[in-house]
Image (cartoon, rainbow, N blue to C red):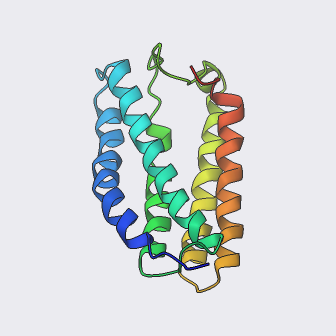
Amino acid sequence: MKKRNINGLIGLALCTGVSLAAAAPVALADDMMASADTAYETREGVMKAIGGHMKALGAVAKGEAAMDAGTPIHAQAIMELSHTVKFLFPEDSITEKSRAKPEIWLDWDGFMKASMDFETASAALVEAAAGSDPAALGAALGDVGKTCGGCHKPFRGPEK
């Protein structure tokens, strides 16, 4: 199977969005007057950016793309975005569109632990992406994926 060099292209496309999305949660945390719709749109953008970076790294882990200069950039972006998750859920930010469950705020400590687990796994992903072993990258990416599920299962409702 021919390996595609997609990391650089996806990275270029996503980095612009990541830069914008990463700045927004900080603004939300500072602006308590942010509307529920704005909070929802911001977190949707961040989560889609994380998913895009994970998809690019998944292609490397599966041998569909080569590890290249874009690989650590994707991992770094995931790690940086992981630090914003705790700011994406201000109180009263549930909308009709949102899949966020009230359990986020009812079990804030549990939500924060899940957020910290994501940050920790993302830091390990950065280390794996700096190497040259797609299997190590895949294992670290799998650990990140487990933290995503560890948050989504208790705190995210079904698709609407």
Q: In terms of depth relative to the viewer, which is nearer, 85 or 44? A: 44
Residue in view at x 33 percent, y 46 percent: 21
Numbered circles on residues, count: 0
Is residue 10 visible to us here?
yes
Vertical placement of 45 versus 119: above or below? above
Vertical placement of 81 versus 65: above or below? above
Vertical placement of 125 versus 134: above or below? above
Q: In terms of depth relative to the viewer, which is nearer, 153 or 118? A: 153
| Residue reaching furthest to the front | 1
| Residue reaching furthest to the bottom | 132
Residue 69 on image: x %, y %: 42, 81
Q: Quadrant of the image for the C terminus? A: top right
Q: In terms of depth relative to the viewer, which is nearer, 106 or 159? A: 159
Residue 59 on image: x %, y %: 57, 67
Is residue 123 visible to us here?
no
Residue 19 on image: x %, y %: 30, 54
Residue 144 on image: x %, y %: 64, 57
Residue in view at x 54 percent, y 74 percent: 65
Q: Quadrant of the image for the N terminus? A: bottom right
Q: Locate residue 136 relative to residue 27 in the image: left or right.
A: right
| Residue reaching furthest to the top | 96
